[in-house]
Image (cartoon, coloured by chain):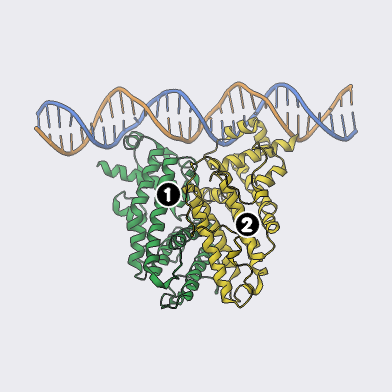
Chain colours: A green, B yellow, C orange, D blue
Amino acid sequence: MASDTRNRILSVAARLFEANGFEGTAVAAILREADVNSGSLYHFFPSKEALLVAVLEKYVEVLEPALLGAAERAADDPIERVFALLELYRGRLLVSGFARGCPVGDLSLEIASRFPEARHLVDAYFESWTGRVESWLVAAGDRLPSGTDRHALATHALSVLQGAVMQARVSTSIDPFDDSVSQLRLLLDLSADETGVSVAFRSDTGRTPVAGAARTRQRVPSGAAASAVATPGTAASPAGEASGDDDAWWRAW
Amino acid sequence: MASDTRNRILSVAARLFEANGFEGTAVAAILREADVNSGSLYHFFPSKEALLVAVLEKYVEVLEPALLGAAERAADDPIERVFALLELYRGRLLVSGFARGCPVGDLSLEIASRFPEARHLVDAYFESWTGRVESWLVAAGDRLPSGTDRHALATHALSVLQGAVMQARVSTSIDPFDDSVSQLRLLLDLSADETGVSVAFRSDTGRTPVAGAARTRQRVPSGAAASAVATPGTAASPAGEASGDDDAWWRAW
DNA sequence: TCCCGAATTGAACGAACGCTCAAGCTCTTG
DNA sequence: CAAGAGCTTGAGCGTTCGTTCAATTCGGGA
């Protein structure tokens, strides 16, 4: 049927763009892997760039259910939700053998200076992300010092995530990711110390993995998927094959 | 002369790779802008990928004098050196109208999963960076709590930088950068509070620009260079033209 | 002065690129 | 069943890609 083809193209394109970049992905490769003829692709998308835009729109659309909503389901405590969100990216790095981090962030630097329309979609994605994190930080109420700049803190969290993903992918090791996140945790812990309020959300609840102390550092032979899985339910897609329906987009973003 | 041509190719390639990505840069464009024939390029570099590797090697080589050394010259206080280093990137974002962030970080995500040799060079670059920052944090001595994980903190600083650059470029605004860095500053301030020692390096020295309070947020009409310049001496290169000598590499990395 | 290797020239290569389109097929609807 | 819109087919368009190479020029030592 019709929309199935469109979704299959979109899904395959997203995967290949993420793996090889936009310029590094040939339209012919998308056609081959999606098992589609060129005419069909150009029936739905007027150009390769329009396909990129559609992929990014899909990411924006899927951010809420697949990530932000999932983080809220994974944790009730507003501050823990921040770390639950980071944990989702962590699991994604591990199960993919450091091939997949944040697909939008990965593409952003390549396209930022070349495709204005695409850049604005990345911008919208980032603003949704930080906006929701900021709302969690607001919900944390007086557990953060009264003068806390929640907007700056949410922006900072996104920076830490994107930089942590970058370093993890480059070094094919989760350690830089854990180290970076541990320092974000430390910042929130120290901030909480400045208030006189409950410290129930302190890091010794052990929710987020923190490296540092026990340095069992090791590298993964690039390409092989790691064994450890973060959040049991959210981890891997059923069987690899890009099925093209909306449900698959949820599970694999 | 011979090495002049080689350097000119290298310099132009670096600029175009940074602006358009690796796959987004045509060899023909490098030839045109460097005013060189294809035979000359392939006399020095066996392939386009080898040229990429050479560019990355140059970045690794130039990291010390152009960035790490410059930060040490800009500040004596070891902790201020961290922020002086970030300030260099900030200035680069501003003078380029958000076109140029960290060239190595920009390329890293595109090439991480495709060119193993190139990926290792990016890794080496990152390790030099964090290694030096870590040494500064060690030099800070008891101004940081005794249990401080200096390695993790240096890794965190690089994450903050890369993520901040990414967000600034995508939004064509310096605000996300300043917000991110302000939170890194806050982390170090709060850490210092945990010790009983001198607080001479506290943020109220006003060295690093901190947004947050006065929100004079604005965007730049993408492409135009901003007026504000960070560190007066380090700012812009003399006259745009890529001269190809080692001196130019220093000034523009 | 001659020589030889390094450096440069630039036309041309085959492959791959993004994309087009006339032609057929397949559903839905009246 | 007829009609027509929606979707698919796939050969092939012109262009650009990274790369090659025989021929030529250049510069420094013998």
Choose between A99 and B129: the one closer to the eye: B129
Where disc 2 sits, the SS reads helix
Where disc 1 sits, the SS reads helix
Choose between B95 and A244: the one closer to the eye: B95
Q: Which residue is mark 1?
A: A123
The three-letter amino acid code for the residue at tag 2 is Leu
Q: Position of residue A8 (x, y in %)?
A: 33, 45
Instruction: Tell me what residue is drawn at x 73 percent, y 38 percent.
Output: B3
Protein chain holding label 2:
B
Q: In the drawing, does residue B39 fall left or right of residue A108? A: right
Q: Position of residue A137 (x, y in %)?
A: 40, 66
Q: Which residue is mark 2?
A: B85
Question: Is B58 rendered above or below residue B144?
Answer: above
Protein chain holding label 1:
A
Q: Picture quarter containing residue A42?
A: top left
Give the Cα distance between marks 1 and 2: 26 Å
Image quadrant in which the N terminus of chain B is located: top right
Instruction: Tell me what residue is drawn at x 62 percent, y 43 percent.
Output: B50
